Image (spheres, grey):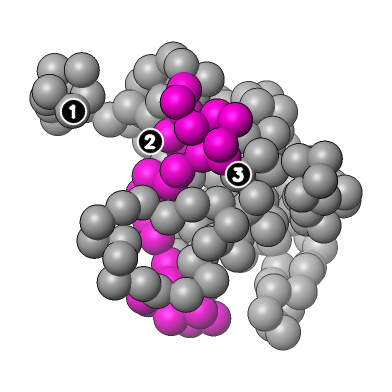
Amino acid sequence: MLDAGVFEGQRFERIDGDLIDKIGQKPPHMFAIQRFQELFIRLFGSSRVRLRGPMEAGAADLEKSMPEPDLAVLKEAKDEYQQRHPIGSEMTLVVEVADTTVRPDLTGKRDLYANAAVQEYWVLDLKNRRLVVHSGLDELNSRFASIQSYFEDETLDLAGQTVKVATLLA
C-alpha cells in the first residue's frame, strides 16, 4: 500500500508489521533533532549524516519492519544509497529522540536496531532529560552489551569530543 501511494503525504514507519503514524513533532523534539544534526555534521561531515531516513532492518525483521530513525551516522557515504536504503551494519550510530515514545524506543526499537547490527543506539529521553546510550553490540546474540544513562549535567565522549547532554536538550 505504501508503494502504491495509498498513504501519500503521510509519514509512517513499519515496525513489526504495523504502520506507526509519525505524528507531528513538538518543538522540543525538533529542536533536539536540529542540535544532533549540527553536532553530527561538525564531527562526521554532512555526507555521512542522515535525517529521518529509512533503513533496512536485519534479516529476521526485514519483511515486517523498516524503521526511520530521527538521525543516523553512516560508516561511509556510498553512491549506491541512490538505489537502496542503508542496512544497520553500515551505520555507526542511530538516534531516536523520544518524548511520547520512550518505552518503545528503549525496548522494541533497541532490539530492532541490535538485530540490524547497528553499532551504537542512542535515545534522547526528553521527559526525563537523559541520553540513554546502547553500545558494545554483541552480534552473536543481537543485543547491546552496555546500556548507560547520561543526565543533562553529565558529559560523554563522541568521536574524541566531549558532549554535554544539556546541549542536546531544549
Inspect the image, locate mark 1, and give the three-letter code of the amino acid beneath it.
Asp
Residue 135, quarter of picture? bottom right
- Please, what is the three-letter code of the amino acid marked with disc 3? Ala
Q: Which residue is mark 2?
A: 25
Which labelled disc corresponds to residue 3? 1
Residue at (46, 16) in percent of width and height: 17
Q: Earlier in the sequence, mark 3 or mark 2?
A: 2
For the N terminus, the quadrant is top left
Residue lying furthest bottom:
160
Closest to the observer, 141 or 103: 141
Work out whether residue 145 or residue 132 is closer to the camera in this orientation and state it. 145
Which range of residues does the magenta coloring cover? 42-67
Residue 147 position in % (x across, y down): 84, 47
Q: Which residue is mark 3?
A: 116
* Secondary structure mainly formed by the magenta segment: loop
Check whether the beta carbons of the residues at disc 1 and disc 2 lie within 8 A of each other.
Answer: no
